[in-house]
Amino acid sequence: VQLVESGGGSVQPGGSLRLSCAASGFTFSSYWMHWVRQVPGKGLVWVSRINSDGRNTRYADSVKGRFTISKDNAKNTLYLQMNSLRVEDTAVYYCARDLYGVGPDFWGQGTLVTVSS
Amino acid sequence: QSVLTQAPSASGTPGQRVTISCSGSSSNIGSNTVNWYQQLPGTAPKLLIHSNNQRPSGVPDRLSGSKSGTSASLAISGLQSEDEADYYCAAWDDSLNGYVFGIGTRVTVL
């Protein structure tokens, strides 16, 4: 099982970024997936979840209406489109596979998003 | 402020047993299963316990989880230096309609 995030970087407040998470080693189309973020030195905060076929999504209130999670099962890739970024969105963003509805099991190494003017 | 309450720190000497508690409510731990994660410095979290007390393959049996009502706990027996890490409890919250984590407990091996 391997999850590799990419797309992080520096952006100004109000800007946009799209994170990607390339999955391999498992049947991606059968699994729900999550995005979780962590401010360096702080705790884990759940961001969003998507079901296996991509039709059902959930978001934390802090990102609802600004972030969009999606997955391309043909490309084995999970995405997080982040719009209207705020300074408080600065964090390491992890993608994680869901263990059959009980929560994240396997995690990627994370990608850092910095929102600053 | 997290929905799930954990003590910020815990410690023990090598060989001791350390227990980490996680307190929630009826909308999260009280109605859903609890997972525990270990995060070593500079690395991604690793699932230690899922479904309250189930160990994934490769997790040693000196780690165990339990749940009672709206609280859960993780026990580490035979504490080793490699156990120095942050430990997070987590569960789905039906009221928030989202996954919630505790603030994390930093375990120090003295």
Image: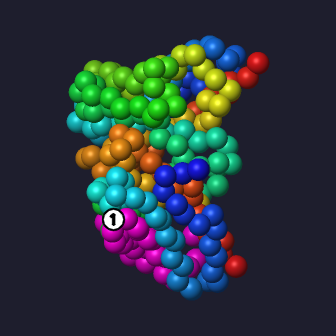
Q: Residues within 10 Å of mark 1 (few under 14, many from 20)?
A: many
Residue depicted at 54% across the width and 47% down the height: A44
Residue A37, by quadrant, is: top right
Q: Name the residue that disc number 1 marks.
A: B52
Asked whether residue B75 is drawn in magenta, I would say: yes
- How far across and down, in percent of the image, does residue A62 sit? 52, 31
Q: Quadrant of the N terminus of chain A?
A: top left
Give the residues drawn in magenta, as a range: B54-83
Residue extending farthest top: A15
Residue extending farthest bottom: B15
Chain label for disc 1:
B
- How far across and down, in percent of the image, does residue B11 sit? 64, 76
The local secondary structure at tag 1 comes to loop
- How far across and down, in percent of the image, does residue A97 sit? 36, 41
Residue B96 horizontal side relative to residue A53, left or right: right
Residue depicted at 33% across the width and 68% down the height: B69
| Residue B56 visible in the current orientation | no
